[in-house]
Amino acid sequence: MVGNRFPLYRELFRKFRGIAVRRSTLSAVAAAVVVILLGASAPAPAAPASTAIYLDRRYSPEERAADLVARMTLAEKAAEMNSSQAAAIPRLGVAAYGWWNEAAHGVAREGTLDNANPPTMVNTTSYPVDLALGSTWNPDLMYREATQISDEAREVVRDNSLDLNFYSPTVNLARDPRWGRNDETFSEDPSLTAAMAAQFVNGMEGQDRQGRPLPGSAGYLKTSTTLKHYAANNSEFNRRTGTSNMDDRTLREYYTAQFRDVIRASDPTSMMSAYNEVNGVPAAASVYLMDTLARQTFGFRGFFTSDCDAVYEIQAGHHWQPPGAPAPLDQIGRTAFANSAGEDLNCQRGFHDTFNYGNTIPAAVAAGTVTQTGTYTENDVDVSLVRLFATRIRLGEFDAQTAVPWVARARARVAAGTWTNSDANAAVTETPARLALARRAGDESIVLLNNARGLLPLRVPAAGPYRLAVVGYYANPATMFLGGYSSQQGTAGTAKEVNGYQGIKAAVQAIDPQAVVDFLPGVTPALDAVDQPSVDAAAGYDAVVVYAGTDATTAREDHDRTTLALPGAQEDMIKAIAARNPHTVVYLETTGQVDVGGFQSGAGALLWSSYNGQRKGEALADVLLGRYNPSGRLPFTWYRDESQLPPIDDYGIRPDGSNPGRTYMYFTGTPSYPFGYGLSYSTVRYADLSLSSRHLDANGVLRASVDVTNLSARPVDEVVQLYAGTPDAPAAAQRPVKRLAGFTKVSLRPHETRRVGFTVNVPDLAFFDQDTGRYTVDTGRYTIQVGASSVDIRQKADVHVSGRLRSVPSVLTAKPAAAGDAAAGITQRVFFPPGTVVDPHLTVAMTDDQLWGYITRGQSTPLPPGMTVRYRSNRPWVVSAGPDGVLRTAKPGVATVTATVQYAGTRVATQFVVDVR
């Protein structure tokens, strides 16, 4: 959003907070618009002649970036658009820069090598994976963790100021448990995913929980985050070359909704396009995905990077032949089509040939390739470079390091130049506070699935004989598996790990020093057979904790699961031990759902989490012994087995004749456990649901509140969930059974009652109508349901909705071009000669997702009658806005133009940079 991009207009940002802003066109639609001159604002002082604009902090990051890009040759520009690494330009003070870094659940990789995968970090804190964080249902916890990750990032990256863009978080949805990367996701639900991921972005980028720059940041980003993989990239076996096919309703309501909501809540700096095609078009060259949806409709203002090597796969894997093209694209064509579609950065390392943006852009410009958006020219390159360098400037790279608070704070914690990426660093950044936070996240992530016999919490006496067996390979492995994109723990880091057996033993013996806590392998080292001596011994213990799981051999990037069965002989181990000892607790630490049908009834209690960080053993002990009352809730539907699932490459989610549907919203079968499910050691009562109104307008707001009471003598964290359904909708409309419309995690003292409130914006309950190309709100009866899971509904009430969703501006974008550019196929530019009329190419997105104005080449829609447009230049001697609304360049310099659209009582704004040369 505009406030984060242009500090000079922070007041404007605050005024229009929550309304994404964009670039769009006015050409061919002037008759529909009343243009009003606002007049220039007071200009910032001009930079001294001896100071280059790109080094002058009085200019905005975008203005500075434009000045820097203008000083580069085309070859230099192209070399800056490779992610590993962007080249150094010593004459301009530009350092080599690694864009490809990882920090999904802790700082894990830094791109310090040229044309190579980024090296793994050694001895950095490893927190629970995203799926585990999703089961906490606690965005505040996610924010605190991301804040610590970004602190650590500033401590360990080169010079505390380079390589600060991280290819995290993954916000694809856990729509199929067989997907190899489910441990990287937050949830199957777009709303829960967006709530968690937005706070990851805010914590990483140095923003508050509302997405505003933190006081004391001096306007600098802390790090840069990357939402990935956009979009519908949820199957590994065909992830590089397959196509994800669906109707536009499914694409908007499900596969891109979480991207939209994170963009609007936290203004992420970048997004990564996926390998796959969406409806036959490679995502890395999709104007519809990157421009029409992400930028023009959702309000995304950052840069796009490809996945590594998604641009290469346009040619090598997809053999894509764009409509109207005489043949499939070659290495020159793939570059032109990707970059002109909005792919700013080429992650070229992975499976690539010898071609990348750096060595093909000059040839693509020289060829004058006609792409989907126009003729490919250096202007397309300039637009991308300004986005990239504005980000680096906002991170503080080009300013005195004493002026960047994030640098000073990192060096106060870890002296400059003392940290090395080796075991010699003594794991100094794995601080007690970070390890305690990893433990807390682990506590909250564990889901209690079954405790029917009341076996938990374990009752360990303060003294006297007590025998506990901890059984299973994953409880005490030679090397602890921490999930995908984890850091590497050397000797110093391993010393700060606590596995399951270690954590349980230490906690039990802290209660009863005389207690015996033994480890039994349970299975053979290869997991292929039950270890019978373990089974025989299990009968002699007061209680048994069986620890079963998965690791990268079960599912990972490039490898899907074909079955939900536990790997190896682990199920047989569980059944055999539970048969010998009725006091058997089963803990599953897995990539996602597994088939529990064979043992869930025999186990005395059943717990689950995904990969739970380097203090996982402490967290498990906390829950087993009742030091933490379990509060985890399933962020997905726990399918019984793979027979309940359609083929993994079927991207439909609504049921049909052969598809039972996906997710709690549409699944027509009976799962093992429902979405949102999880038990605790307490009984919580819900009562007295109150609604602000039983009759709502389609544009209205519903306020709901409910009393939640802890009936037990121990504290509890309860996840209160609110769902909305449309029970009277006709079957032909294919509405979901219900949708998550709100949730909150509330801490209750023993016997405490709290009133928990929710605010539901009725427009958020709209559905996309493909026939009209807009969102609409169903009229009629809605059921508001509040409870402890998607099926455990404790309170409900009906409301009636009437009226029609207002269509008012929500996002404004611009692609400025010079008058006459259209004839040359040029649709956007940064640099203009003096005396040129600027055509801003405005696009207005409405609250119902309709688009007006310039959309892309050959697609323009007149702005609605009565919509007014105003312009203001911060340096009118560089660019003037005349009384007739015409923008005209004057003297050399750089200026920011603010365009404001007003319609039906609603105003939105955007800004764009014009560099006059």
Image: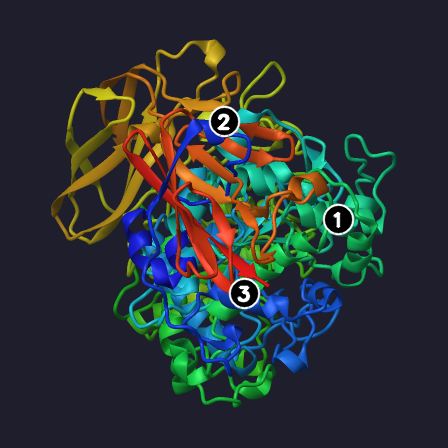
857 in relation to 670, above or below = below
**Scheme of image coloration:** rainbow
Q: Residue at x 42, y 42 (%)?
A: 885
Label 1: which secondary element: helix
Marking on residue 862: 2
Q: Gap between marks 3 and 1, in whole Å?
A: 30 Å
Name the side, left or right, on which 418 lies relative to 869: right
Could you tell me residue 395's position as x and y percent? Answer: 48, 70
- Whether residues under marks 2 and 1 lie with C-beta atoms below 8 angstroms apart, the answer is no
- Mark yes or no: residue 305 visible: yes
Q: Gap between marks 2 and 1, in whole Å?
A: 29 Å
Q: Residues within 10 Å of mark 3 (few under 14, many from 20)?
A: some
Question: How many tags in the picture?
Answer: 3
Q: Earlier in the sequence, mark 3 or mark 2?
A: 2
Q: Identify which residue, 829 or 761, lies in the foreground.
A: 829
Instruction: Name the residue that disc number 1 marks.
Output: 336
Which residue type carries mark 2?
Answer: Pro
Image depth: mark 2 or mark 1 in front? 2
